[in-house]
Amino acid sequence: MTEALIASNVILWLLVIVLALTVLALARQVGVLHERVAPAGALSPTNGPKPGERVAEKDTRDINGQPVTIGGAAERPTLLLWISPTCPVCKALVPTAMALARDERLRLLFASDGAGAERHRQFILSLGIGDYPYLLSESLGRRFEVSRLPFAALIAADGTLAGKGLVNTREHLESLVESMETGIHTLQDYLQQVLPETDNAKASLQKQRESA
């Protein structure tokens, strides 16, 4: 009886050790995967103005006739978000954009190229964005090559286009701010610049360990 109890305890401890080793191996793989997974940035189109290019200053008016200047040097970066009353994702993204603008001290403008000013006024009222400029302009959408919504463009304070693209989440919007702060304008640029540097650093560390 005693021998059976000892044997069962030994088997139990062996199973615990194997389980612990398995958990450690999985944790290591999760860490490697985390390093390899690129950030989910805004999907940037290849047509239209390119990030890093200067956005020429242009005067226009919002839906209420108030003057609005887009482009050129400004006190704060400008976040342009194209939305539409018929876009459910746009409606969900508006509070996120407002919160991001507050957190990052951005000048937030909403835009649409749809017709029917009264419908858009009702849309503005339903979203509670009456304090923000709302632009109805087809030419503005063509200027930035907006083809699908929601679409955002971030213009840095110096007047250059920091980033643009289709956005569905706060992470997408934040990627535009990251582009402005890091100078890496697109996810493709990130993959080409950052990941090779990380791989080179790992290779150098591995060589140091082998020579030690």
Image (cartoon, grey):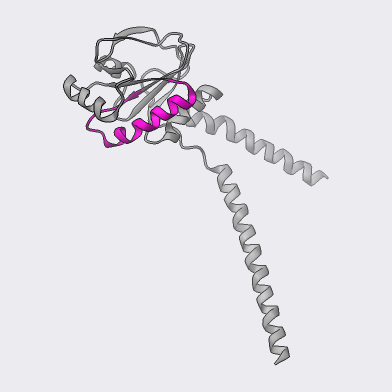
Query: Is residue 10 on the magenta stretch?
Result: no
Quick check: 19 left or right of 117?
right
Percent of width and height locating residue 141: 29, 19
Percent of width and height locating residue 155: 43, 17
Compared with 90, 2 (above or below) is below
Q: Residue at x 39, y 27 (%)?
A: 98
Number of callouts: 0
Percent of width and height locating residue 9: 69, 80
Quick check: 113 left or right of 110?
left
Quick check: 68 left or right of 212?
left
Q: Residue at x 51, y 22 (%)?
A: 180
Question: Please, what is the dominant secondary structure of the magenta stretch?
Answer: helix
Q: Quadrant of residue 65?
A: top left
Q: Choose between 207 and 63: the one closer to the eye.
A: 63
Q: Choose between 156 and 31: the one closer to the eye.
A: 156
Q: Is residue 48 visible?
A: yes
**The magenta segment:** 81-107
Q: Quadrant of residue 42?
A: top left
Q: Is residue 183 visible?
A: no
Q: Residue at x 30, y 36 (%)?
A: 89
Percent of width and height locating residue 43: 40, 32
Compared with 62, 85 (above or below) is below
Quadrant placement of the C terminus: top right
Query: Is residue 82 on the magenta stretch?
Result: yes
Q: Which residue reaches farthest right?
A: 212
Q: Residue at x 39, y 25 (%)?
A: 46
Quadrant placement of the N terminus: bottom right
Quick check: 135 left or right of 104?
left
